[in-house]
Structures are given as C-alpha cells and as structure tokens.
Amino acid sequence: MTNRERQLLQLLQTNPLISQQELAEALGISRSAVATHLTNLTAKGAIKGRGYILSERRYSVVIGGANMDILGTPGQALTPGSSTPGTVSYSPGGVGRNIAENLARLGEDCYLIAPVGDDHSGRQLTELSSQAGIDTSQMVTIPGHATSSYLSLVDEQGEMQQAIADMAILDAFGPDYLRKHLGLLARAELLVLDTNLKNSTLECLFGQLPEQRFFVDCVSSSKAPKIRPFLSRIHTLKPNLAEAEAISGIHADPADISDSALQALAQWFHREGVERLFISLASEGLFYSHRSGESCRQRLNCHTVINSNGAGDALMAALCHSWLQQMPADKTCRFALAAANLALASQTTINPEMSRLNVAQLLSESM
C-alpha cells in the first residue's frame, strides 16, 4: 500500500461519508487522482462496497495526556536540602500516551489522541510514540502552548517521592478538537480515557458516543472525582484505594483491605453503573468486581522495583488487552499484575521489553 493510499484510508476512517472533492482538497491532489486511489484500494480489499465501507480492523483509541518525562534517580539515600548523586533521564510519558504504548507493545492496534505543542518536545514526543508502534496520525497540535512535561524524583528503592506536572495544554484541549474524530471513535473496540481531560471534554465524549465502551484510568485522587458524573457510562474503571475513596466518598482504610471491605466498596460503584471495577492494591495485588456479583483477588510477588512510575499505566493497558483477547477475570488479573511487575523492573516509564511473550514468561516464573 502506498503512502498516499494510507493517507486516504486515515481520512476515510475519520469520516466515512467524506466526498471525493473533500478528499482531494485534504490531500492536495485532483479529484480524478482520488478516484483512482479509491479504485486501487477497493481492488486491494481495503475498501468494500459503496460508501467507503472499510474492511474490518479492530483497534482501540486512547485519549488523554502525553508529555515528556524527566526522571531523577539517586544513587544513594536522598539528602533533604542537598544535592544527591544520581542520574537524570528523559522519555516520552503521560498516562494516556503510556497506556497507548503498552497496548501497542502488547500487539494491539492503537490510536492516540492527545494534545502537544508546536515545539521541539511535541515533535519529539509524537515521533518517539510513532516509533513505539502507536498510531499518532490523530494527534492534536495546539499552537501557542508548550507540550506537557512531568518531572519526578524517586528514592533509592525506586518509589516516587515528589513530582511536578506541567500540563496546562490540556486546559486548551476541548471538545472542538474531538468532534472531527467522532467517526473514528465510534468504530473503536474500546476507548480509554484518563482523568487529565477537562470536564467539558469528558462530557463531549460520553454524550456523543452513547454506544461506546469506555475504560477509564483515574490518574490521581485529586483528578479522579471528575469521573463521578459519568460512572453509569463506564465499562471498566481502574482506581487505587485513594482514588476509589475520592470518587465514592467512602473511607477506604489501607489497613483493612479484606475481601468483604473491598466488595462493599465495589457495590457502591456498581450501584452507580460501573460494569467492571479493578482496584489496584499496590503490593497487595488487584481486586476485581463485576456488577453481576462475580469477584476475585489476585497477587503476584514482585522481585525487582526500579521505577514505580509506569506500573499503573501498564496494568491498565493489560486490562484492555485482556478484554480484547476475551480472557476470564482471574487470568485478566494475573496478566495485568505481571505487566505491572514488568514495568516496575524498568528504568524508563515504559519497559522496552513489554510484550505478550515476556508477560507470559514472567507469569510462568511466578507460578
């Protein structure tokens, strides 16, 4: 398939009802050239029937934050009020972007829709994301805004101590930037959202896509409450205990994480309409509950912790992958935990060794 044909397919995926003249204007070619490309694509089986009905292709779309991560790792115990020898590394990050890359590394076709600035960081972020296997053709460039950045400091055990997030560009990423993508979003197998999105953007997505399956990552206890008005629309929700408490208002005591306490908390979410709930319990594993009454809890020992920043993003991506692969609940939990553990063992936020094969290998070693 030629580059021009790929460009044409991307436009058709975004808007299957687009006219040949509109395609010609978007691509800067003649209408007769468009007609020739459409004929070739039909012959190749990429388009079937009239009205530009595309051949079936399963894909997911992630909408959320994308930023450059700046990570400080000390070589010894941190000394308050003083500098500590260590390393500083740079890598692409952002909750939504990280989920998309993990999904791509797990073998899923995945689009990322996220805002970046018209700056070096934005171009670098888009290029590195594309190299990692993410389809970045729908990324949104917002002139006059700096690409988001996330500065974090971990301790000698790899646990995050402090972080600063510069994500002002997300305040400019409103519904107007998403409406042209609605055709693509409606045909996705699932949509993944993170709560970095502002309220009006969330309202647009939930309001304009009534039949879509939404998977939501809560990001943090300060941002998680944004999702409360939309709980009845959420297929899969992944909070940790603090985020679950922030959304529900129900005190979640970390000292009492018995199955009965977790089930009582889960029932609140199910009454609000959430179909599937996965509560991340850090080193204590993962609790799953379905509104039908099914529940389970799994735990895997993690032997290597270098950087905890990307574990939750890997876990969320693995939950999406498991659903796409129709895994049962117990296998889903174990696969997601193994993916999180693989992420913990990497210096970078995304483990470059993330793959279905390596997650399965880690699982087999833990049994």
Image (cartoon, rainbow, N blue to C red):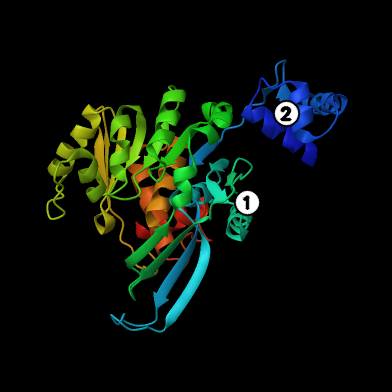
Q: Which residue is mark 2?
A: 46
In-image side of 113 versus 197 (left or right)? right
Residue 1 in view here: no
Quarter in which the C terminus is drawn? bottom left
In-image side of 26 versus 143 (left or right)? right
Dot 1 amino acid type: Ser
Q: List x then y, in percent, for residue 69.
A: 48, 62
Displayed quadrant of residue 277: top left
Q: List x then y, in percent, for residue 198.
A: 40, 40
Please tell me whether residue 17 is drawn above or below residue 132 in the rendered image.
Answer: above
Image depth: mark 1 or mark 2 in front = 1
Dot 2 amino acid type: Ala
Pick whichever, 222 or 117, lies toward us: 117
Quarter in which the N terminus is drawn? top right
Q: Disc 1, disc 2: CB below 8 Å?
A: no
Q: Secondary structure at mark 2?
A: loop
**Residue at the image point whose x is 22% and y is 44% from the top:** 246
Q: Secondary structure at mark 1?
A: helix
Q: Residues within 10 Å of mark 1 (few under 14, many from 20)?
A: some
Pick whichever, 186 or 336, lies toward us: 186
User: Which callout, 1 or 2, points at the residue further toward the start of the chain?
Assistant: 2
Which residue is farthest front? Answer: 144
Indicate which disc residue 130 carries.
1
Q: List x then y, in percent, for residue 299.
A: 28, 53
Please tell me whether residue 18 is drawn above or below residue 120 in the rendered image.
Answer: above
Q: List x then y, in percent, for residue 32.
A: 87, 24
